[in-house]
Image (cartoon, grey):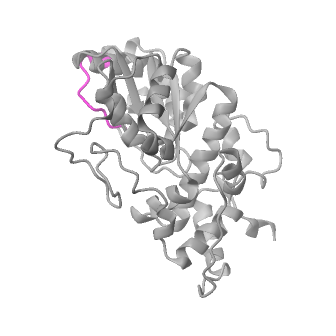
Amino acid sequence: MSIIIGGPPSTGSSLLSRILDRHTQIACFQETHLLGKKQLFTNWETHKSRLQTTRLFSPGWHMYNSIDFPSNIENYGSLLESSSTVCDFASTYFSSLAADKGKSRWAEKTPLNIYFFHSIHKDLPDARFLFTIRNPYDTIASLILRGKSVLDAVALTLLNLGVGFLQKQEIHVLVVKYEELVRESEQTVKAICQYINVDFEANQLKANDQAKTKMRGWKHFEDGQIETTSLDRFKELTANIQMQVLHLTHHLYIHTKHLNAFQISNPHSNPRSFNLQGLLKEFDYPQLTCEDSNSKYNPSLLKNRVKRFLKLHPSALIYPVYYE
């Protein structure tokens, strides 16, 4: 049984993958992007020869066009030939790597997997899907502190969170909240283990004695101790940046054409009805306002910048300026 992890970046998926990988039965592989390429789902026979190239495109606001295999593939040609779908290929490949580690289950974590939960479910009906989320304001703040622009951070969060919300309407998906994972670690991990049908092991919560994996802007090592000090990161942004974020969360919407392109069912007929403010309610997160009246932020300053960026992603998002 495979385990597929996806969701917005900076929502605790790396921490979760480390927790799962410590289980004696599970080998969890990170950021391979193998199950995040539309071309491989829509026309496997035509595009499977591109697996080792940089010509496989990522959905939404993701820009990575390669696949990162965690290990060399023995009998690569014969495996390609015998695999009828990308999921078939992934299952054989990851199962082999897991067996090399003495484990019977495999998991894969790439944020953009969220776009293909429904497609993977068709080919791997026994798979389990973990959808990692976090207060969207804190997710956006974390991405900005990692070096993303305000627009990039909001767009990534909105698209992946919105797509994930729709995915869980169609298939059985377990939502894993970052806040619960770090505040109520044992209880949350036990629930995850029950969902993926393995026994909880206390070792899953034990940090690496020599933790060393940490991205720019992170406060903690992903293989270190589970900490709660990365909560409320939105408060670390300046009032001006907070105002820009709040403006965009009200005015950027997921375009229905974008969802249709990935055959993701969308009950919202109005293209301007699906934004982060609505998703906050769906996931029981509070809305915020910026109370710093001294901020000189002017929403019109974002207007031209948004228009330029959206030209690069004409089907992904819409902004009210196009309706004025």
Pinpoint residue 69: horizontal percent, then vertical percent: 30, 32
236, 1: nearer the viewer: 236
Q: Is residue 227 visible?
A: yes
- Which image quadrant: the C terminus? bottom right
User: Which residue is at a point 43% across and 27% down the rendered structure image?
Assistant: 48
Q: Where 93 falls versus 311 (above or below)?
A: above
Q: Main secondary structure of the magenta part?
A: loop
User: Which residue is at a point 74% across and 39% down the rendered structure image?
Assistant: 266
- Which image quadrant: the N terminus? top left
Q: Which residues are magenta?
A: 67-77
Q: Quadrant of residue 120?
A: top right
Q: Quadrant of residue 82?
A: top left
User: Which residue is at a point 45% across and 45% down the rendered structure image?
Assistant: 183
Pinpoint residue 86: horizontal percent, then vertical percent: 46, 23
Q: Where 207 falls versus 84 (above or below)?
A: below
In magenta segment, residue 180:
no
Q: Where 299 falls versus 6 (above or below)?
A: below
**Residue, far top:** 82
190, 159: nearer the viewer: 190
Q: Where 6 falls versus 308 (above or below)?
A: above
User: Which residue is at a point 64% across and 25% down the rendered structure image?
Assistant: 171
Q: Taking 171 as reference, is 240 left or right? A: left
User: How many numbered callouts?
Assistant: 0
Pinpoint residue 211: horizontal percent, then vertical percent: 21, 45
Q: Is residue 66 visible?
A: no
Q: Quadrant of residue 253?
A: bottom right
Pinpoint residue 300: horizontal percent, then vertical percent: 67, 80
